[in-house]
């Protein structure tokens, strides 16, 4: 059986594509495939209200499970697409199953820029998914010190939540300004000063060369030789 529209990636773009098709009365079958085990959700709150514990998980979802069922949008979760065979109009899943399509939408988003380190993965977190946010949220409750690598929007948002929870917060940033890619120097200074006045420490012009394990703690080795 051919599926009329197959969407790879059930993030914001993939989810909204399916929803918009139904809102415009598209009559064919729609299948949404996602690597994560969640309904399509919005990520912005992961570094804001959801991380702070102010927003419930269900508020992240674009629509409820009931909506997708009622609108006949079939969601396949926890499933990674490995290959697309355009000649035969099929996709191949990690579990080697195949699915055929009439029209294919690729909405696979972006991936986290992971650091190469000698450290074991324990207590080293990247923030991208609901699962990541839940782990970090838990740590913010029971740790007293956090180092954030990257002073972009997301890094600073985590810093502001962590400092409110009375953690000792250090932000390491490669550039000599915070949020340098997205704001002017004046705005950057404003946010840096605001964070500093709340107690956040910055190490600017500094890259992380490695992360090592020292008992239960991590040692972050910086480009200026500091630890
Ligand atoms: C913590 C955080 C905070 C953010 N805050 C903001 C903000 O305040 N404002 C703002 O404008 N933007 C923000 N963003 C960015 C915004 O969330 C992204 O721009 C948006 O998620 C992009 O949506 P997308 O659907 O294109 O991709 P994604 O959300 O990345 O979704 C793609 C989906 O495809 C799945 N996928 C990938 N490959 C495969 C495969 N082979 N098989 C099956 N599934 C696959 C992925 O698992 C993922 O679920 C934030 C992002 C993060 C992580």
Image: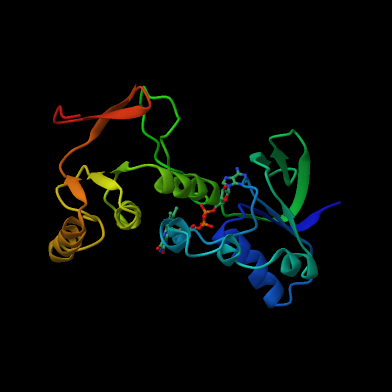
Q: In the displayed image of the protein, which residue is found farthest to the right?
A: 1
Residue at 29%, 54% in the rendered image: 163
Residue at 17%, 63% in the rendered image: 184
Judge whether residue 110 can be spotted in this image: no
Residue 122: x and y in percent read: 45, 30
Q: Say if 45 sits above or below 36 in the image.
A: below
Would you say 99 lies left or right of 197 here?
A: right
Residue 194: x and y in percent read: 19, 62
Observer-nearest of 53 and 5: 53
Residue 148: x and y in percent read: 31, 44
Observer-nearest of 92 and 67: 67
Residue at 43%, 59% in the rendered image: 52
Judge whether residue 194 can be spotted in this image: yes
Q: Quadrant of residue 93?
A: top right
Colour convention of the picture: rainbow
Would you say 160 lies left or right of 124 here?
A: left
Residue at 49%, 58% in the rendered image: 43
Q: Say if 153 sits above or below 173 in the image.
A: below
Observer-nearest of 82 and 155: 155
Q: Quadrant of residue 95?
A: top right
Say how many tags the image has.
Answer: 0
Q: In the displayed image of the protein, which residue is found farthest to the bottom?
A: 24
Image quarter hosting the C terminus:
top left
Observer-nearest of 218 and 172: 218
């Amino acid at each position: 059986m051919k599926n009329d529209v197959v969407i790879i990636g059930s993030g914001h773009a993939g989810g909204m594509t399916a929803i918009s098709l139904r809102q415009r009365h598209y009559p064919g079958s729609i299948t949404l495939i996602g690597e994560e085990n969640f309904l399509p959700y919005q990520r912005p709150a992961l570094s804001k209200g959801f991380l702070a514990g102010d927003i419930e998980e269900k508020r992240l979802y674009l629509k409820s499970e009931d909506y997708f069922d009622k609108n006949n949008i079939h969601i396949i979760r926890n499933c990674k697409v490995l290959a697309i065979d355009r000649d035969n109009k099929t996709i191949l899943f990690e579990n080697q199953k195949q699915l055929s399509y009439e029209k294919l939408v690729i909405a696979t988003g972006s991936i986290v820029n992971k650091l190469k380190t000698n450290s074991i993965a324990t207590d080293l977190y990247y923030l991208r998914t609901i699962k990541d946010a839940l782990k970090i949220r838990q740590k913010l409750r029971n740790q007293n010190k956090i180092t954030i690598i990257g002073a972009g929007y997301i890094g600073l948002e985590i810093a502001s939540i962590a400092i409110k929870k009375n953690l000792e917060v250090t932000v390491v940033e490669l550039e000599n300004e915070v949020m340098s890619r997205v704001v002017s120097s004046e705005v950057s200074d404003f946010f840096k000063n605001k964070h500093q006045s709340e107690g956040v420490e910055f190490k600017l012009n500094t890259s992380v060369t490695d992360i090592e394990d020292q008992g239960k703690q991590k040692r972050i080795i910086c480009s200026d030789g500091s630890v």
